[in-house]
Image: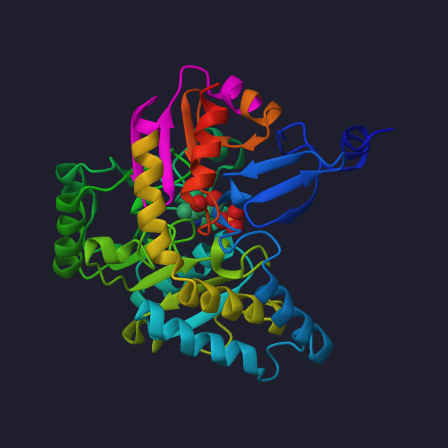
């Protein structure tokens, strides 16, 4: 029996997988069980930002493995405290709650918003994706994901993305929080317009709701800034982070401003694994590599080059750093053909391709990818 048959036998069939069994990775490449090499422009969906099996990450993790893997939040552990200090420095946020995934980070933000404001209503946007647990799903727009699981958390209203008039109608003094993906990732890389974000910020001032920026996909250098909020000069009340934070080691975080944080009480939320020493060490190592190897700058430079090369062949190329989307006529076929030819790419719809490669990618690897895509 091969791996794919074995998978079907005992793994719940919630995923539609590409026909490849990945065994190992190095830098921007992964290898399947037969030793075939693939250039990876998916990076675990915007996650393996410092490259597969980064030696600096491995070294730090090995040291931590031999020291302490887990202790619980019943106690203080040093990597968690060091990580919070580092995150304060790079995010400008004041307090941090650690969890294990993006959806959990959103979940925490929604709870904290209700707790801090005493209000109930959430507002999100058409095509926003925030995760698949019940709270995060409640503010995720796609009908296909939501419908089978209703009733979800309410009240939630969806505003048409980039429509200021619609936004003005739907937020009010009852709104606990507005949650936004500043650059839609799962929908295929579509950024919010500056005017729209400015209007949102002004409405926050007027109505006193909290603004949650979901940086799960856009965070840690992906967009050519440390965080997408910097592109818009925005200071959110809370931020959700995960994915690239641990370069593949599961970790998530909800960051809060002090005036929200001070309304949260002991026992309001918690997690067995959240802030675990191993995961926090992975995040510390990841941030260190991003800083030392100037990967935010690389995201701008190589991202611009990638988008420019793609525009020679494809329509509707949108590139924000190394978060890139473009149209093809048959995205499913395109992904399959790339895979056959040693390239991992991902489609977000029938005709949209999204590229979120490791931030260490070079112009030479971009050329290699373009060659495969266009042959
Ligand atoms: C913007 C955004 N928020 C939340 C999530 C959920 O993250 P996770 O899959 O780690 O639960 C995702 C995942 O794709 C995402 O892109």
Q: Position of residue 38 (x, y in %)?
A: 60, 35
Residue 196, quarter of picture: top left
Rendering coords of residue 78 (x, y %): 56, 83
Residue drawn 40% across the image and 42% down it: 363
Q: Is residue 210 left or right of residue 256?
A: left
Name the image quarter holding residue 193.
top left
Instruction: Check the image and report above or below for 363 versus 144.
Output: below
- Residue 258 lies left or right of residue 357; in this view the side is left
Horizontally, is 223 left or right of 66 in the view? Answer: left
Establish if 61 lies above or below 322.
below
Residue 319 falls inside the magenta stretch? yes
Q: How is the image coloured?
A: rainbow
Most extreme residue toward the top, as rendered? Answer: 329
Is 86 displayed left or right of 343 in the figure?
left
Residue at x-position 35% and y-position 69% = 90
Q: Nearer the viewer, residue 223 or 115?
A: 223
- Is there any visible trace of residue 257 in the rendered image? yes
Front residue (pair 244, 108): 244
The residue that appears at 30% across and 27% down in the rendered structure is 311
Is residue 126 visible in the rendered structure shown here? no
Q: Residue at x 59, y 30 (%)?
A: 342
Q: Give the residue furthest to the front.
A: 364
Query: Which residues, given as a range, are shown in magenta?
Result: 310-336
Q: How many marks?
A: 0
Q: Is residue 372 magenta?
A: no
User: 352 above or below 285?
Assistant: above
Which image quarter holds the N terminus? top right
Q: Position of residue 279 (x, y in %)?
A: 59, 66
Query: Which one is nearer the viewer's eye here, 322 or 370?
Result: 370
Q: Viewer-proximal residue, 298 or 270?
A: 298
């Amino acid at each position: 029996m091969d791996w794919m048959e074995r998978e079907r036998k005992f793994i719940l069939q919630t995923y539609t997988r590409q026909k490849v069994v990945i065994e190992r990775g190095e830098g921007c490449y992964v290898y399947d069980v037969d030793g075939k090499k693939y250039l990876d422009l998916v990076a675990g969906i915007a996650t393996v930002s410092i490259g597969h099996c980064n030696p600096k990450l491995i070294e730090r993790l090995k040291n931590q493995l031999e020291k302490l893997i887990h202790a619980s939040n019943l106690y203080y552990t040093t990597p968690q405290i060091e990580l919070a200090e580092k995150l304060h420095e790079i995010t400008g946020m004041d307090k941090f709650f650690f969890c294990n995934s993006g959806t959990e980070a959103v979940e925490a933000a929604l709870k904290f918003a209700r707790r801090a404001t005493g209000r109930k209503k959430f507002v999100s946007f058409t095509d926003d994706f925030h995760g698949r647990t019940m709270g995060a799903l409640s503010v995720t727009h796609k009908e296909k994901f939501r419908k089978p699981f209703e009733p979800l958390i309410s009240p939630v209203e969806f505003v048409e993305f980039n429509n200021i008039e619609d936004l003005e109608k739907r937020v009010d003094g009852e709104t606990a929080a507005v949650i936004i993906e500043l650059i839609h990732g799962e929908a295929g890389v579509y950024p919010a317009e500056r005017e729209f974000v400015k209007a949102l910020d002004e409405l926050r001032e007027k109505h006193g709701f909290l603004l949650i920026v979901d940086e799960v996909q856009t965070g840690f250098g992906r967009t050519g800034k440390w965080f997408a909020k910097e592109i818009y000069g925005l200071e959110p009340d809370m931020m959700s982070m995960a994915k690239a934070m641990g370069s593949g080691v599961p970790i998530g975080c909800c960051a809060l401003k002090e005036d929200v944080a001070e309304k949260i009480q002991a026992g309001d939320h918690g997690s067995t694994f959240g802030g675990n020493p191993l995961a926090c060490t992975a995040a510390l190592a990841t941030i260190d590599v991003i800083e030392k190897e100037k990967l935010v700058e690389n995201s701008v430079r190589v991202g611009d080059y990638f988008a420019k090369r793609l525009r020679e062949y494809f329509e509707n190329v949108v590139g924000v750093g190394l978060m890139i989307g473009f149209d093809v006529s048959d995205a499913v076929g395109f992904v399959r053909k790339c895979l056959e030819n040693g390239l991992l790419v991902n489609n977000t719809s029938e005709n949209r391709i999204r590229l979120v490669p490791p931030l260490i990618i070079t112009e030479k690897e971009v050329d290699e990818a373009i060659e495969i895509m266009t042959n």
